Amino acid sequence: MALSQFSRRLFGFLLLLGTFLQSQVAPYGAPAWPIPDSLPTQTLKTLAAQSPVALNTNGAISQYNDKRLIQMRLILPDSSGFRLLLSAASLTEGDRIFIRFTQSSGFLGPYTREQFSAGGTLMTEVIFESDIVIEWVQPSTEPRQGDVFIQGLAAYRPVSVKSRPAEQIQPVRRSRVNPVILVTGYWPPTNEMIRQFSQNPDLNPDGWMGDDWEGRGYDIVSFFPVFDIPDCDDCGQGNGDLEVDYQDTSSDFWNIVADLQPIAIITFSRGWIDHSWELEWNLVNRTNWIYDYTPPNQPTPNPPDQDHPAYLVRNPDLPLEAIVSAVNTAGLGLNSYVDWEGTAGMFLSEFMGYHGVWYRGENPYGEFPCLAAGHIHVGGQIDWDTARTAAEITLRQLTDYLDQFIYTPGDTNDDGVINVQDLVIIVNYILGLADPDTVQFYAADINTDSIINVLDIIIILNLIIGE
């Protein structure tokens, strides 16, 4: 085998390994030191076309307070979205690695030793800028052996994934009570952006705004923690309807869903410190969680979903591509995308996100089915008003998606009125002049005997004439 072929295969293996094992949610900590005007610069290429670049060997070394900084400027091919593959074998517990954006004050990280795989690799999240600085922050000013290597770039390529076929979703009969959409948040801005949907007057003194939200026929209800410093960085456990604690979160979640029986769930949390609106594709029933603040510091039981094997991956049912398109075209300055390859981070973000898709998987049918669930990471640099607007855009896409599975018996054309037009449609179904889709069949089968026939015509005729 030629060396170049071997290199490409080796890089592909490292790419896969690093992507699967890396953690998205990093310990919080913002770089407070300036970026020098002049730094060693590397222009990166993708995949095996890139030779490894050693950061310690080729970067600029300086000191900030009692820390040793190693910095290098990186030029990416463009700003369409790339991930860096890093490798390191000698990181200490106090080492931090940041990716900083030169055109804004955003950054990714800090990445720590715990986030590298057992093989010493890590795949960063998607970078949407072409001019960046990578920084290795060491806890001591003393020089050290070892290095961090920039192995290359992986281009972000959106993947088209088909939604679940409509026939796999049981249509839901519209009742006099609006179905509930449950939204949760954790760290700011996510808790603040959904405050309007809280029914807790202590958390939302302005009053609940989720009742038949925007006249769409759904009630939106939110739960979230609050913190002593509302715009906090390192926020701690917090208090309120939820807390940043595995046991508290799980107990509260199951009580909440038992009470609300939601038709859909979106769990939000703070992601990278940038302007991203990142929809997670993989939510894992893992056992290797980041410690929370109060013992026991891991979930109990662990993995949380004891009826399924550890590291089972569940996927969302949200209208992912519709949400991404709507947020990106709203003129908010956000980067919305689906993280098809990574995971949601090993902390309370993924824990809560997994609970949402877990509940959805266990409640697909019945009188109160859950039709959609998923997790969204919200960039920490998004201001509260913008985050609130993006959350509302997301909810509109979700309600539009849910509408296709909600029916009113007899209202076969879903215009909100039962009249002669619905009667004509049912007659056409019986005569074979038209074929109903799944939801139309449920609406036409008004006596629920699984057959559309003259009995349904008699019932709907009586509804029309008021008998």
Image: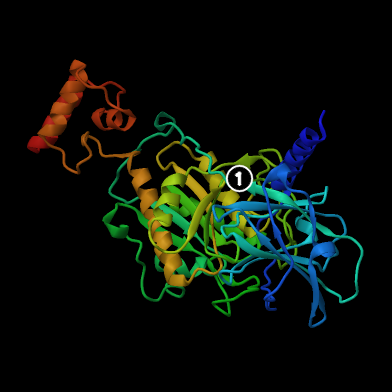
**Label 1: how many Cα within 10 Å (few below 14, some 14–19, many 20+):** many
Q: Position of residue 92 (x, y in %)?
A: 86, 64
Residue drawn where x is 21% and y is 35% of the image: 413
Q: Residue at x 31, y 51 (%)?
A: 177
Per the image, the residue denoted by label 1 is 282
Residue 240 placement: quadrant: bottom right
**Image check: 335 left or right of 5?**
left
- In the image, 258 versus 4, the foreground residue is 4
Quadrant showing the C terminus: top left
Q: Is residue 467 visible?
A: no
Of 114 and 175, the residue lying toward us: 114
Q: Secondary structure at mark 1?
A: loop
- Residue furthest bottom as drawn: 65
Q: How many badges with numbers are in the image?
A: 1
Farthest residue toward the top? 431
Q: Position of residue 63 (x, y in %)?
A: 80, 79
Q: Nearer the viewer, residue 212 or 194?
A: 194
Residue 103 in percent (x, y) is at 56, 69
Q: Can you tell which quarter of the image residue 212 is in? A: bottom left
| Point 42% across, 73% down: residue | 204
Q: Determine whether 20 is above or below 92 in the image.
A: above
